[in-house]
Image: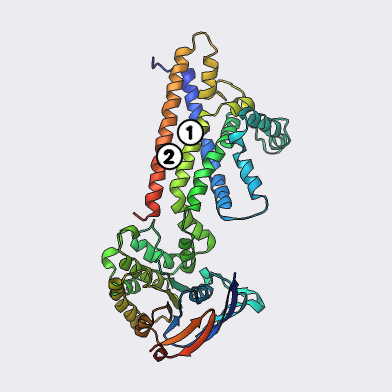
Amino acid sequence: MFDISPTEWTAILLSLRVAVIATLVATPFGIALAWLLARRDFWGKSALDAIVHLPLVLPPVVTGYLLLLTLGRRGLVGAFLADHLGIVFAFRWTGAALACGVMSFPLLVRPIRLSIEAIDRRLEQAAETLGAAPWRVFFTVTLPLALPGVLAGMVLGFAKAIGEFGATITFVSNIPGETQTISSAIYSLIQTPDGDAAAGRLVIISIVLALGALVAAEWFARRATARLHGN
Amino acid sequence: MLRVDVEKQLGDFSLHAAFESEGRVTGLFGASGSGKTTLVNMIAGLLRPDRGTIAIDGDLLDDTAASLHVPAHRRRIGYVFQDARLFPHLSVAQNLDYGRRMNRLAADPAQHQRVVDLLDIGGLLDRRPGKLSGGERQRVALGRALLSKPRLLLLDEPLGALDEGRKLEILPYLVRLRDEANVPMVYVSHDAAELRQVATQIVMLRQGRVTSFGGVKMLA
């Protein structure tokens, strides 16, 4: 049963690469946005909040199609990036990472935002009176105290990215070795007459990865509470 | 050395306070709601006055007429809060070192040792704030503020969160601090007995106004 074929390995490794890159690139943006939503009041804040959460409620195929329209080879932004910077997302693994990043972004932002909101702002005031400029307050007090939330968000985002299907297959298709992730490999396998065993193996791997991520996220959340109480 | 003349409106509450202090420890005395913390927050730079000036040693920190507001982190004014506010993710030693690092001051082991001895916190250095008693936390907070080498130290009800026994435990440290640390202080309290022991002059605050100003004797 557990003879993993080279094609399956390719899909697993590609999924991991896509999810890792998506999470790492999305995290700094996620932190910045979470901070903005937690700490600032500005015009259009609820609209921004809604847009961030949109991938969570939109049909993934719609998100994928919108990505194709904007960032595809003929898309407004996509054409510019391809012609001037040589960056192409459509039908490349980088496009899969982008789609996964967009789809997992709301899950990444939420725990970070909650952990920033939970920080006692009087600690930041104390840091100011001790001579810390605002950006140093952020890096020495806010971010370290929010770190468990950041890690929890990264884990959840990673889990979502590794399982993403609809937006990815719409935006970058299902090309073995380039854009065929675990999910799209399972999709292909269950449409193949003898694919059941292989699909089953990939399904088990998906379940293990997702469960592992949930356990890790829970553990980070508990660390967060301990950290805020100074133990 | 400290000259304050400020106005601030916060909802229904209006503060209009002016005083000049030369003493080593200026006691800011008043009931809760008299505006003590608001005033101290303005001196620290955490709150901006609506109108007026704040100056230390002739150095203007706030002057609303000239739109001058030196931000808290550039004032070099230490602040000891009622609730200590130690950084929970840092050890006691790292908390103590924080102000020196943020102000990019050179390490001063002699001064560090003096403060640690003065406050008897040598045995706590490796601990996390969560493992300290209330009194220990307040002593570390005092040390942390002192080690940032402030030109003025603000203490806002530093004993307020402690029970009677703990207060008596900390009070001698505050008196030693006054006599040995060589930093002018503004000491906020609603407890006349406490101020009689620590302060050298008194500013009395009532409903946002300075009602009297003078020696500690006026608290008797």
Q: Same subunit under labels 1 and 2?
A: yes
Q: Amino acid at mark 2?
A: Ala
Residue hosting label 1? A159
Query: Label 1: chain?
Result: A
Label 2: state its secondary structure: helix
Q: Quadrant of the C terminus of chain B?
A: bottom left
Q: CA distance from mark 1 to mark 2?
A: 10 Å
Q: Residue at x 46, y 21 (%)?
A: A202
Label 1: state its secondary structure: helix
Labelled pair 1, 2 in contact (Cβ < 8 Å): yes
Q: Residues within 10 Å of mark 2 (few under 14, many from 20)?
A: many
Asked if residue A98 can be seen in this view, the reply is: no
Q: Residues within 10 Å of mark 1 (few under 14, many from 20)?
A: many
- Residue B160 left/right relative to B103: left
Q: Nearer the viewer, residue A140 or B197?
A: B197
Q: Whole-percent x and y of residue B80? A: 42, 71
Dot label at residue B56: none
Query: Label 2: chain?
Result: A
Residue hosting label 2? A217
Q: Amino acid at mark 1?
A: Ala
**Residue with the most extreme top position:** A193
Q: Nearer the viewer, residue B156 or B60?
A: B156
Q: Whole-percent x and y of residue B137? A: 34, 66
Q: Is residue B124 above or below residue A29?
A: below
Q: Nearer the viewer, residue A142 or B199?
A: B199
Q: Whole-percent x and y of residue B71? A: 56, 70
